[in-house]
Image (cartoon, coloured by chain):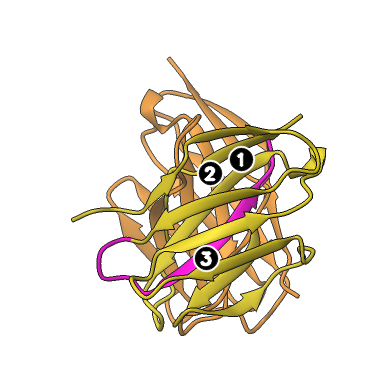
Chain colours: A orange, B yellow
Amino acid sequence: GENVEQHPSTLSVQEGDSAVIKCTYSDSASNYFPWYKQELGKRPQLIIDIRSNVGEKKDQRIAVTLNKTAKHFSLHITETQPEDSAVYFCAATLGGGGNKLTFGTGTQLKVEL
Amino acid sequence: DAGVTQSPTHLIKTRGQQVTLRCSPKSGHDTVSWYQQALGQGPQFIFQYYEEEERQRGNFPDRFSGHQFPNYSSELNVNALLLGDSALYLCASSLRFQETQYFGPGTRLLVL
């Protein structure tokens, strides 16, 4: 089955700096890759996603890149703010709906003032 | 537009007991997936329901079972609770042929 590895497990940056979180997946058939943000005691919230027919997607300060050949994808957050502090999870799944999400182990991002 | 809702928010049980958790999907969604999130871990897929049938199952024992009702809401049942079942149980809803899943707030289960 699919296996998703995520690094780093913790990341501390200064406010205004950029943060990068990396994930690798094992199943070359996976073609949908969402990122979720989970604040303490809250539900995972979808922040951005990418499909395998796209190499990069951007939404304001957040971007995701995908390298299908290498089977890895990354989350980039620019101009970090204290409210970006949370746990971020990457996930992978087969496309077409009706398929389970396989999650990484999470990255605790701390944005320091 | 109502999002995904779950009940109860918290639950305390003792070993050997049984528990039922409930989920109402986002308005318009017809597919419900259940995940278990242990402390400090990513969510682990338990199973998925569509058209009132279990469509996919993760690596969880038969003590974990579920149901989906005609209005698309769903229940997760866990029998013979173990200490290791203590976790946050998340429900996610989606449309059958779309990948995007939206999560509910979860039910935090503590087994003593």
Q: Nearer the viewer, residue A72 or B86?
A: B86
Q: CA distance from mark 1 to mark 2?
A: 5 Å
Q: Pointer 1: what residue? A: A107
> Vertically, is A21 above or below A24?
above
Circles 2 and 3: CB atoms closer than 8 Å: no
Amino acid type assigned to the residue bearing label 3 in the image:
Ser
Magenta stretch: residue A96 in it? no
State which region is magenta: B26-41
Q: Residues within 10 Å of mark 3 (few under 14, many from 20)?
A: many
Q: CA distance from mark 1 to mark 3?
A: 23 Å
Residue B38: x percent and y percent?
A: 69, 42
Q: Pointer 3: what residue? A: B33
Q: Secondary structure at mark 3?
A: strand
View extreme (front): residue:
B17
Amino acid type assigned to the residue bearing label 1 in the image:
Thr
Q: CA distance from mark 2 to mark 3?
A: 20 Å
View extreme (top): residue:
A113
Q: Nearer the viewer, residue A71 or B11?
A: B11
Q: Is residue B2 left or right of residue B8?
A: left
Q: Secondary structure at mark 1?
A: strand
> Vertically, is B32 above or below B18?
below
> Vertically, is A55 above or below B13?
below
How many numbered discs sit on the rendered protein?
3
Q: Secondary structure at mark 2?
A: strand
Please give the chain letter of the residue carrying mark 2. Answer: A
Please give the chain letter of the residue carrying mark 1. Answer: A
Q: Residues within 10 Å of mark 1 (few under 14, many from 20)?
A: many
Amino acid type assigned to the residue bearing label 2 in the image:
Tyr
Circles 1 and 2: CB atoms closer than 8 Å: yes
Circles 1 and 3: CB atoms closer than 8 Å: no
Q: Say yes or no: labels 2 and 3 on the same chain.
A: no
Q: Pointer 2: what residue? A: A88
